[in-house]
Image: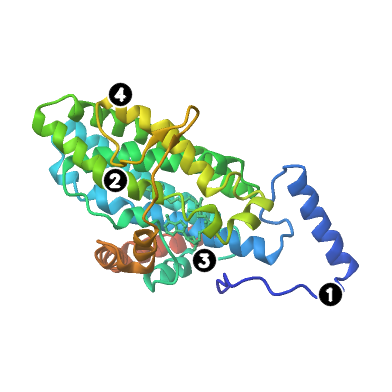
Amino acid sequence: MPVDTAPEQAAPEQAAPEQAALEQRFQDEIDRDGRIEPRDWMPEGYRRTLIRQIAQHAHSEIIGMQPEGNWITRAPSLRRKSILVAKVQDEAGHGLYLYSAAETLGVDREELLDLLHRGRQKYSTIFNYPTTSWADVAAIGWLVDGAAIMNQVPLTRCSYGPYARAMIRVCKEESFHQRQGFEAMTVLAGGTPAQQQMAQQALDRWWWPALMMFGPSDTESPNSAQSMAWGIKRFSNDELRQRFVDATVPQAQHLGLTVPDPDLRFDGEHWVSGEIDWSEFFTVMRGDGPCNRERMTARVAAHEDGAWVREAAQAYAAKHAVITAAA
Ligand code: BYC
């Protein structure tokens, strides 16, 4: 089925009674905070919104393997290397759960990958920044996985069953990733002056892009209102961003690091950030960030290089199906 993520067409004025009953059943399920399952009737706009978000999420996981994968050969010890290999493999696994969740909505993962490769679907802006030192790997675990958890824990209660269930396992793994990042950051921040400087510079590089991961401000977020009404998003972009800032500033203080925001202040209840440079966010989202082209070139090359693996797996599955049918 071709992927169509265009806005939903206006419903015909006179919906058939049967159609009205289906809509009512869907709405009742949403209102009672139940789960919509793949075989349930759902509005076309709900299906398209989920395909858009889940596909973007899946693409982010697999493109997100690149900045860290870049450091596997240069990790400072065997222990750090084995942890990093496991983490990058986890991200691949998250991508697979998410493509599977998207497929329950009637799309094919080959088609979603094709849309990504042609620049027709997005992935998170955060992965278009370079990892210039080992401390960036630690900062990604601490900040990027920390932001991911803040955003994804509410998705375990998303109204679409397969997405919510995929998120439970993803969040458990992201939680481990965040802890290992914070632990690696703790070692650097408590190390030699050169290591402390690496840790500070990594925080300087990743702080603002991590805040941008939560998406545009609520006033500039075209999809939030409908996604919240449908129970796909449980909190707005700004609410989740604020939770992240509140959780992370004390962690930076604990590490003895300075958050690179001269306007950051505590108002008695929350840590209030200075203004985010939204022009940078939109530039990166449009494809003009520091590493957009490099990331897409590597992704397309990996897809092409892996064609023989997919063909071999399909040939094996076909052979196995014949053997099973004959048995
Ligand atoms: N980057 O109306 P809005 C990870 C787009 S993986 C790029 O607020 P929505 C990890 C948005 O798609 C991290 N684009 O949208 C992996 C929309 O564009 P279209 C990924 C962004 O969907 C490996 C437009 O801006 N996490 O954590 O209601 C290692 C307007 O925005 C971004 C997920 O995908 C962005 N940052 O809310 C480590 C989580 N932000 O399609 C870690 C699931 C917004 O209308 N996704 N856009 O043209 C979500 O929760 C929501 O999709 C978002 C955006 C909060 C991201």
Q: What residue type is labelled 2?
A: Trp
Q: Name the residue that disc number 3 marks.
A: 108
Q: Is residue 248 above or below residue 24?
A: above
Query: In terms of secondary structure, where does tag 1 sit?
Result: loop
Q: Where is the N terminus found, in terms of image quarters?
A: bottom right
Residue at 44% from the left image edge and 52% from the top image edge: 96
Tag 4–tag 2 contact (CB < 8 Å): no
- Earlier in the chain: of badge 1 and badge 2, it is 1
Disc 4 target residue: 254
Query: Which residue corresponds to mark 2?
Result: 206
In the visual, does 161 lie left or right of 19?
A: left
The x, y position of residue 18, in whole percent, is 87, 65
Q: What residue is disc 1 on?
A: 13
Distance in Å between CA atoms under marks 1 and 2: 50 Å
Label 2, label 3: how far apart the Cα atoms are: 34 Å
Query: Which kind of residue does numbered mark 1 sit on?
Result: Glu
Q: Distance between the residues labelled 4 and 3?
A: 46 Å
